[in-house]
Image (tube, grey):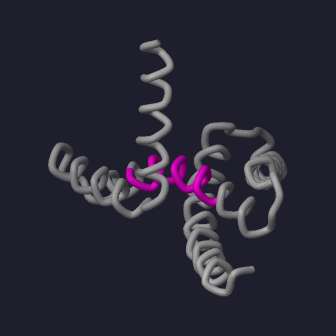
Amino acid sequence: MKPLFLWESLKTIYAVLAAVPFLPFAAVYFGSRLLAGDKDRSFRLAMDVTTLLLIGCVAVLFNRVFSTTFGLYGILLLMLLGGGFIGNLQHRRRGKVDAAKAFRAVWRAGFFVMSLLYVLLMATGITQHMLGL
């Protein structure tokens, strides 16, 4: 019974954090800033943590707004394609692919794209709910 309770607790914590992603972003940013003192590194760490939350939240919002189950798969597909394009670009310019840099670039670009989609899909979802669509 305890593993099920732990799993449900983790799901609830994730859902709450993903629903308002600016709160975990601020918490990670200010916590890291207090511990490390480096503003840029703290911002990047907060972006990296929040991206994971945004992916889940945007996937659910996409599924609800468009009445589909493709949200998470579409996000993962676009991120994989982005990684392939960046890897191709690296290979053409340098002759080799640095997978860590490609992953980091896709992950950080994902933060900005997911943030924009979060705002758009949240507004769309609220509007649909208010209009009863």
Locate residue 128, reporting x and y percent: 68, 80
Q: Viewer-proximal residue, 127 or 56?
A: 127
Q: Taking 38 as reference, is 99 above or below it? A: above
Whether 47 is among the magenta residues is: yes
Residue lying at 73% horizontally and 69% vertically, measured from the top left: 65
Q: Taking 66 as reference, is 35 above or below it? A: above
Q: Viewer-proximal residue, 36 or 46?
A: 46
* Residue extending furthest toward the front: 132
Q: In which quadrant will I find the C terminus?
A: bottom right
Residue lying at 45% horizontally and 55% vertically, measured from the top left: 47
Q: Is residue 40 left or right of residue 76?
A: left
Residue lying at 43% horizontally and 23% vertically, measured from the top left: 6
Locate residue 95, reporting x and y percent: 80, 42
Query: What is the number of callouts on the image?
Result: 0
Q: What segment is highlighted magenta in the picture?
A: 46-58
Secondary structure mostly seen in magenta is: helix
Q: Is residue 130 left or right of residue 21?
A: right
* Residue extending furthest toward the bottom: 131
Q: Is residue 104 left or right of residue 71?
A: left
Locate residue 41, reporting x and y percent: 34, 52
Whether 132 is among the magenta residues is: no
Q: Taking 58 as reference, is 34 above or below it? A: above
Locate residue 87, reporting x and y percent: 78, 46
